[in-house]
Amino acid sequence: MMKKAENIIVGISIGDLNGIGSEVVLKTFEDSRMLELCTPVIFANVKILSFIKKNLETTVALHGIDKIDQLIPGKINVLNVWKEGVDLNLGTNDDKVGEYAIKSFVASTKALKEDQIDVLVTAPINKYNIQSEEFKFPGHTDYLNQELEGNALMLMVQDNLRVGLLTDHVPLNQVSNHLTEALIKKKIETIKQSLIQDFNIIRPKIAVLGLNPHCGDGGVIGNEDDAILKPTLEKIFNKGTLVFGPFAADGFFGSGQYEKYDAIIATYHDQGLIPFKTLSFGKGVNYTAGLNKVRTSPDHGTAYDIAGKGIADFNSFKEAVYLAIDIYRSRIQHEEMTKNPLKVKEK
């Protein structure tokens, strides 16, 4: 049976406290109607968030708890992951503050694994100040891939525009070395399954962008498209997946060609994210597809330059909450629709 809306527990990791994360979280839940959609629990410290709330002059009421089973529907719950105070200097990069961002993230991930929360929405972190002997990951996705089941894939989402990546945080001069038949098959299968179970698209159509300008122009500008991408996509297509390409990336979005497909896969980070953010910035969501749990985040970073000024746009974070709830519900529906109705009688 599907959970009632207000009983969907949305865990929130607070991100970098010197950035805009706390602001966009608090602004999102200023609208009391959000509490009709879910029960939020922020992994942080209620005294610190109360200080930030006062500084921003927001009207939200925070409910501090020390254990997850103390949360109350209809309240903005703040789980005290730590008790001590934290010195904040809004708008600055601080290694100590980075430690608390990871405390929040690790605690919320643990709660997600243990089904204490239903979905996780992560506020932005600084990839530099989170590094330590205990946490050596480039960001959220890599840690989640280790802790959860499945194969993580970053999928940027805004309405019907969905952009995934064959390679994500890889230096540009190393991208071609990572493009193997095995990787391409795995990523396309991950996106296909996500489109089916998370977005209710029964026969998804997927487009793949070429690596080189003009897809290599027959080998004149690189041979990876002809040698790796084209034959691999053909094999996948012949086995029943509606995958098309590779397409020359330069005109794919400007011509509106992307609107014909349920998802687009770029070969490297900026090839996909520059057009995505150009088309949807402020409303896009970063969704970690391919895992057994649901995690989303806004499409922006810590934005130190505007932290504490009360001018941060919270719409991307709010969309991340909406999408997490929608996917959670879609997965329940998909499971109910595909489970075997015939029960095997025990001997």
Image (tube, helix red, strand yellow):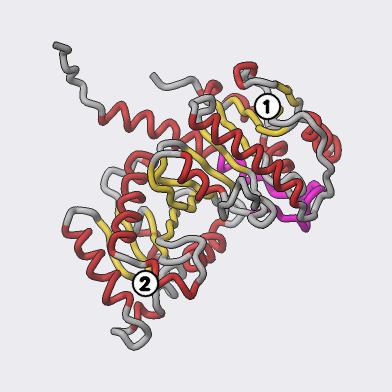
The residue positioned 69% from the left and 30% from the top of the image is 81
Of the residues tagged 2 and 1, which is closer to the observer?
1
Q: Which residue is mark 2?
A: 210
- Marks 2,1: beta carbons within 8 A: no
Q: Residue at x 45, y 54 (%)?
A: 161
Q: Position of residue 20 (x, y in %)?
A: 73, 48
Q: Quadrant of residue 213?
A: bottom left
Q: Name the residue that disc number 1 marks.
A: 79
Which residue occupies the foreground of this view, 54 or 123? 123
For badge 1, the amino acid type reads Leu
User: Which residue is most to the front?
Assistant: 133
Side of 126 where 36 appears, left or right = left
Q: Which residue is painted at 71% across and 48% down in the image?
A: 98
- The residue drawn where x is 74% and y is 42% is 23
Secondary structure under the numbered disc 1 in the rendered image = strand
Q: Quadrant of residue 200?
A: top left
The quarter of the picture where the N terminus appears is top left
Question: What is the magenta range?
Answer: 301-321
Q: Of all residues shown, which one is farthest toward the bottom? A: 220
User: In the rendered view, would you say 256 is above or below 304?
Assistant: below
Residue 71 position, x and y percent, is: 64, 19
